Amino acid sequence: MAVNEEALMWVEKYRPKNLNEVVDLHDIVESLKAFMKKPKTMPHLMFAGIPGTGKTTLALCIAHELFGPEWRSFTLELNASDERGIDTVRERVKDFSRYSRSGFGNVPFALIILDECDQMTGPAQTALRRIMETSSRTSRFILICNQSSKIIEPIQSRCAIFRFSRLDKQAMKEQLQCIAKKENVNLLPEAAEKIVDYSEGDLRHAINALQTASAYKEGVVDEKTVLLVIGEASPMQVQKMIRKALFGDFIEARKTMYEIMGSYGFSGSEIIRQIQREIFKMSDLTPEQKADLSNVIGEYDYRLTQGANSDIQLSALLAQFAKFGKAIGETY
Amino acid sequence: MNNDLLWVEKYRPKKIEDIVGNEEAKSCFVEWLKSKRRSKKAVLLYGPPGVGKTALVNAAAKEFEFSIIEMNASDTRSEKAINEVAKPATSYIALDSFSAANKGKGNILFLDEVDGIAGNEDRGGVGAIIKIVEEARVPVVMAANDPDVDKLRPLKKVCLLIRFQQIRIPLIIALLQKICLLERVKADFEPLEHIAQNSKGDVRSAINDLQSLSEENHVLTLQDTMTLSSRNKDISMAETLTGFFSAKSVAEASSLLSRSSVDYDEFIMSVSDNLPRRYGDPDELAAAYDFVSQADIFRGRIGTEHWFLLKYFFNALSRAAAVAPESYKPFQFISPPIRIITLFWTKGKRTMLDSICGKIGAQCHVSHSIAKHDFVPFVKIMLQNQKSSPLPSWFKFTPEEVDFLTKMNKY
């Protein structure tokens, strides 16, 4: 495993730099390697999949493979959700392709990595499609998204699409142990188990949890510390809030909601998104119950966009949870 | 005299001396209007409603033979609309003064209710007014109730400010007595005093009240004026909440809301705060919250302009009051920490969190949103546990940002 000694966040420090270092994702890596042999043939790429499964890592690997240590001069990294509007994206792409027109060595184009494309609206995507067309002689795009279905057809048809699935638990545990060894941390097996369980195939999340846990105690990461860390980080609070509401303790649930809003500065829609994620992690609900709750969440997710006060809509959602909890009665 | 007229119209002051009170403001305005070389080309008359601002402008114009070109809040005052009406009025003055019909001294441009310039529709309105003041060759007079409205601040710089105060009670009583005499209304001193006090120095509303109470049988007793105080009395937040939660029916809650003058936004939040104390049963609570949620959606749609939707807001909210009238028990109102949270997450702190997320994003190739969810909670714990962590310098955090992160969950 190559190590980026300058980086202090382990997710950066142990991020693979070229395709050979990537341990999982064999099929994808093999296809990409084929492109690297003849860069001229590389089409626009689209990486789709849940967070923390290596999409950005592979995109950066490609940049390294194509341009070597000078990759930053030929690569534009953009985040669709951070840029203010498609016009900003257009301007930056235009400026960039003007200055890096010549490409590098036998690579006749510059690379544009556009993350979180599925956050873009339909009209913005249509504009993006146009940008891809007008700059196609000088640039290649790597579009990264969680769901390819949210990307309009004309863009999908211009890309080679690669789907990233949830990382294998065993492989994740091996990765964590490997990092722990390099950092001289004794990661106990049951602690690794907990981290992996909790991270749900999101390796970035798992590594962040590991690093945070190792900051608690010198040299060893045990189960107790892991629970402490993930309990303090926000998603656990969200689950606590959901459980309280389902148990009918509405006032306590709402108190937790205020804590989450206050401590982390999350907006109403961010909390709803987390609620949605956490519901599907809860093993004591049947799939049918999860689906029913999901419908309710969806309704309030929409109301949130229409209403004036996010805390009122969230409270109303928690009240629905309390009603739901009462209805399934004995289970809870 | 025409008997169908509203008394406020009928007894509108014809001469400056007819206007009661505010002697200082009156003479100040007259002096400004009469002077040949005005120190400021525009004047802003400000003060509570019904104290004679518009009346003064009209009366003065009449006395000094100016014609008035008026725009008020009911006209749209976008830059375009202002220019259409006001520009010709200010620049074609010379032509006008030669005409035989107009022997006066010219025009006054009068912009009434300038604090009513709305944000969106009247875009550029304030700027256009300032431009007109600068270019105008005629006196520009403006009137406003609340001179502290932010958007009028630039106006205040180019205007002479003249302040109007509430009219003193004895002056209003005297005026009412005069009107009673002319309208042949038999009224004692006490009921007139009551009307005057109730008007809070607003002559217009005092005259309106007098007319509505005495027009029919031309007698006014103290008993008659009693309905007045209850009609105009503000119902406080606590009273409204108590009445709201104890309402037996949707209709009762609805009529209470229409009488109360509490702030809508504050009220819906207070209802949301206290709903779980009112409804213990999850089914009832969920049903009530559903209505509050719908009311909130209407509030969102109302925004700052679609106030015609307010009735739907009230209807939805009223239904939340009467989900289960039989289960009502009095309870103590609470105010949960949401207000504190709103105060805590100031714009400055949000900007700081945003800047932190941006720095994390730059180092770790993630968006602000992922930085906020998947990095900030962890980085925060690491900084809290390792006093001399090298992380801040790697992320290029400022000391303020480090301080902010380590104290993050203690709002």
Image: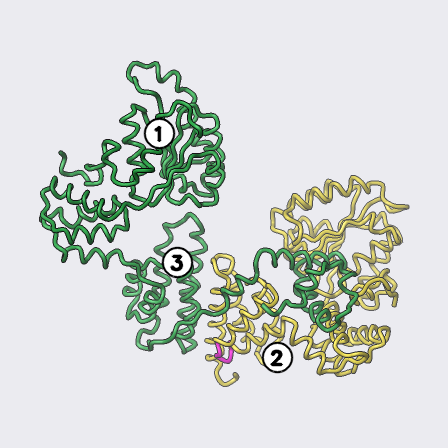
Magenta stretch contains residue B119: no
Q: CA distance from mark 1 to mark 2?
A: 82 Å
Give the yellow chain's letter: A
Residue at point 61%, 58% (across, down): B350
Farthest residue, direction right: A105
Q: Position of residue B314 (x, y in %)?
A: 35, 59
Q: Label 2 is found on which chain of the structure? A: A
Q: Do the dots labelled 1 and 3 sit on one chain?
A: yes
- The disc at residue B264 is 3
Q: CA distance from mark 3 to mark 2?
A: 42 Å
- The quarter of the rendered structure image containing the N terminus of chain A is bottom right
- What amino acid is labelled 3 in the image? Tyr
Residue at point 88%, 63% (across, down): A20
- What amino acid is labelled 1 in the image? Glu
Vertical side of A306 occupied by B66: above or below: above
Q: Which residue is mark 2?
A: A283
Residue A276 visible in image: no
Q: Label 1 is found on which chain of the structure? A: B
Side of B171 relative to A109 (left or right): left
The residue mark sitting in front, 1 or 3, is: 1
Q: Label 3 is found on which chain of the structure? A: B
Q: Which residues make up the magenta segment?
A: A245-250
The residue mark sitting in front, 3 or 2, is: 3
Q: Position of residue B290 (x, y in %)?
A: 42, 67
Q: Position of residue A275 (x, y in %)?
A: 58, 69
Q: Which residue is mark 1?
A: B31
Side of B339 relative to A1 (left or right): left
Q: Position of residue B172 (x, y in %)?
A: 22, 45
Side of B159 relative to B209 (left or right): right
